Image (cartoon, grey):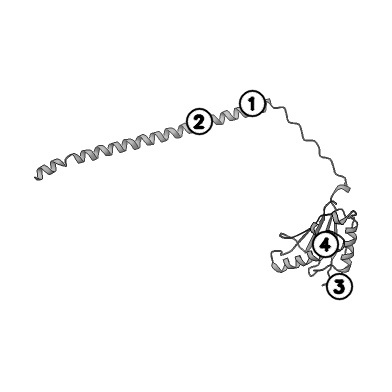
């Protein structure tokens, strides 16, 4: 009985050896095939690249020579954007300092605030109104953008102060006849300025 049992299972070692050889042969074939495909892909890529380069060079040879860019016209000084700067001491300051002279305005006003100034003092308000009046035309048809900036604008207290400055200037513009829906305001928290300021830009009527 024992001899018959061992003889019945004698084929398994040979079967396992044959199966192992088949698996090894298949792995070898797969590896060779993968290497062949990789080399073939590289060769095809090189050929396509050479073809595209040749086509591009042929198109450049057929294209007419590029003309040099035309010289840009020089703008007259009157056409350039001018900025009027107005010093604002504020009613909060102990003494209202006299601001600088107001130059002829084109479309931008820059209000330079003292560190403690929030509202427009009387002198700054008069200069601001005179500069706006110098724009001419109908103020109701003009779009206005007010941008507040300054030092440490990431701090909430400085942002609240900037908002109060913006509202004071916005109310002055409303008193002068600018339509409220044409006024946009923005607190610039990304640009760091040495001192608080407002830029008031006027669009064309």
Reading the image, the residue beneath label 1 is 58
Q: Using the numbered discs, state the Cα–Cα distance from disc 1 to disc 4 in whole angstroms.
A: 60 Å
Q: Using the numbered discs, state the Cα–Cα distance from disc 4 to disc 3 in whole angstroms.
A: 18 Å
Give the residue at x 71% y 69%.
157
Give the residue at x 42% y 32%.
36
The residue mark sitting in front, 4 or 3, is: 4
Give the residue at x 25% y 37%.
18
Residue contact at pointers 1 and 2, CB within 8 angstroms: no
Q: Using the numbered discs, state the Cα–Cα distance from disc 3 to disc 1 in whole angstroms.
A: 77 Å
Reading the image, the residue beneath label 2 is 44
Q: Position of residue 59 (x, y in %)?
A: 65, 27
Mark 4 or mark 3: whose residue is earlier in sequence: 3
Q: Using the numbered discs, state the Cα–Cα distance from disc 1 to disc 2 in whole angstroms.
A: 21 Å
Q: Secondary structure at mark 3?
A: loop
Residue contact at pointers 3 and 1, CB within 8 angstroms: no
As drawn, 62 above or below 75: above
Identify which residue, 131 or 185, lies in the foreground. Answer: 185
Tell me the quarter of the image containing the N terminus: top left
Residue contact at pointers 1 and 4, CB within 8 angstroms: no
Reading the image, the residue beneath label 4 is 111
């Amino acid at each position: 009985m024992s001899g018959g049992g061992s003889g019945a299972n004698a084929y398994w070692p040979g079967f396992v050896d044959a199966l192992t050889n088949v698996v090894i042969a298949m792995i070898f074939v797969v590896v060779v095939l993968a290497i062949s495909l990789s080399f073939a892909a590289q060769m095809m890529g090189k050929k396509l690249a050479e073809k595209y380069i040749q086509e591009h060079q042929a198109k450049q040879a057929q294209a007419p020579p590029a003309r040099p860019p035309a010289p840009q016209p020089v703008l007259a000084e009157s056409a350039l954007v001018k900025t009027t700067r107005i010093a604002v001491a504020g009613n909060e300051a102990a003494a209202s300092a006299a601001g600088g002279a107001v130059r002829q305005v084109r479309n931008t006003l820059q209000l330079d605030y003292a560190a403690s100034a929030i509202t427009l003092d009387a002198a700054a308000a008069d200069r601001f109104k005179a500069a706006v009046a110098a724009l001419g035309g109908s103020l109701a048809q003009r779009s206005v953008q007010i941008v507040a900036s300054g030092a440490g604008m990431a701090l909430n207290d400085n942002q609240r102060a900037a908002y109060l400055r913006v509202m004071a200037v916005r109310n002055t513009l409303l008193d002068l006849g600018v339509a409220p829906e044409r006024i946009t305001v923005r607190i610039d928290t990304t640009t760091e300025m040495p001192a608080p300021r407002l830029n008031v830009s006027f669009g064309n009527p």
